[in-house]
Image: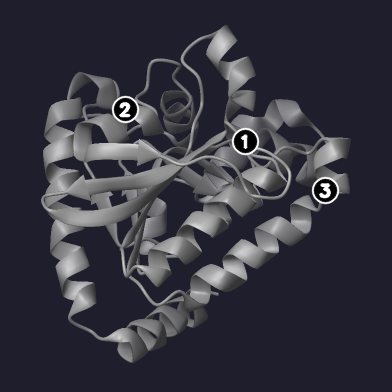
Amino acid sequence: MQVKTAWEKVQIARQTDRPKTSDYIEALFDDFIELHGDRNFGDDKAIIGGIGILENIPVTVIGEQKGKNAKENIDRNFGMPEPEGYRKALRLMKQAEKFNRPIITFIDTPGAYPGIGAEERGQGEAIARNIMEMAGLKVPIICIVIGEGSSGGALAIGVGDRIVMLENAIYSILSPEGFASILYKDSTKAKEAAQTMKITAQDLKELNIIDHIIKESKEGIQNNFEKVIMELKKYIIKNIKELEKLGTNQLLVERYEKYRKIY
């Protein structure tokens, strides 16, 4: 079987009919209750968050949400969160810590929204605060890259004890087009940039940046979604139980060492 190039994986990760965070929530969790708002400015629909049950385990679930058509994408801002989205996510993560619930995050964004309003409301601060706070949360955190994981938009909900990627997902410091524009001064060289950036699940597993790869069909996850859900559920439950056995102090020490080793 021919191995897909990095650019081919970028195209698969961006497929419109690829399952979104809401599809994973519906398939994995029972009795999900969505919670809204950052208690400061508003409710950002580019991030879904709430509480659900995973095989009798109460968990907090947070994920970036793209749309499946033009209307949904406009409503969800194409999965690009604004500061209030990240502040909503942090509010729910702190709530999870208070009630000792594990946190599951789903990463799928081309990046944080770069608009003037978002910058005026503290986009950079919101992302940085999430990264800092997640490093010290006293509950297990499992982060799953289901599509695009680009830039600080992904990192703002991507600091975890276990980092998982779908086989055709991508995870990078920014989009290949953005990388090509900066490095090559030519966004049309995105294909070349994708190969250079080492953004595929296989590359990142070799570099020890992620912990596990969930296999999917060669055409995309939509063709074997139920099988992926079964494997993902098994992985999440197994690792929650392992992480809970560590105790708070050891959990935080291992998370700290994990990121010191990576960076």
Q: Which numbered tag is attached to residue 121?
A: 3
Q: Which badge, 1 or 3, is on the more N-terminal residue? A: 1
Q: Amino acid at mark 3?
A: Arg
Q: Amino acid at mark 1?
A: Asp
Residue 137 visible at all: yes
- Report the Cα–Cα distance between label 3 and label 2: 30 Å
Task: Locate residue 131: give its quadrant.
Answer: bottom right
First in sequence, mark 3 or 2: give its number.
Answer: 2
Q: What label does residue 103 carry, if any?
A: none
- Tell me if label 1 and label 3 are in contact, CB under 8 Å: no
Mark 1, Cα crowd under 10 Å, few <14 / some 14-19 / many 20+, is many
User: Where does the image place residue 120, in percent across and percent down from the top left?
Assistant: 88, 46
The residue wearing badge 1 is 44
Q: What residue do we see at 41% from left, 57% from top? A: 204
Mark 3 lies on a secondary structure that is loop
Vertical side of 34 occupied by 165: above or below: below
Residue 212 image offset from top left, x and y in percent: 27, 57
- Look at the picture and state if 93 lies above or below 227: below
- Of circles 1 and 2, the one toward us is 1
Mark 1–mark 2 Cα distance, whole angstroms, equals 18 Å
Residue, disc 2: 23
The image shows residue 145 at horizontal and vertical percentages of 40, 45
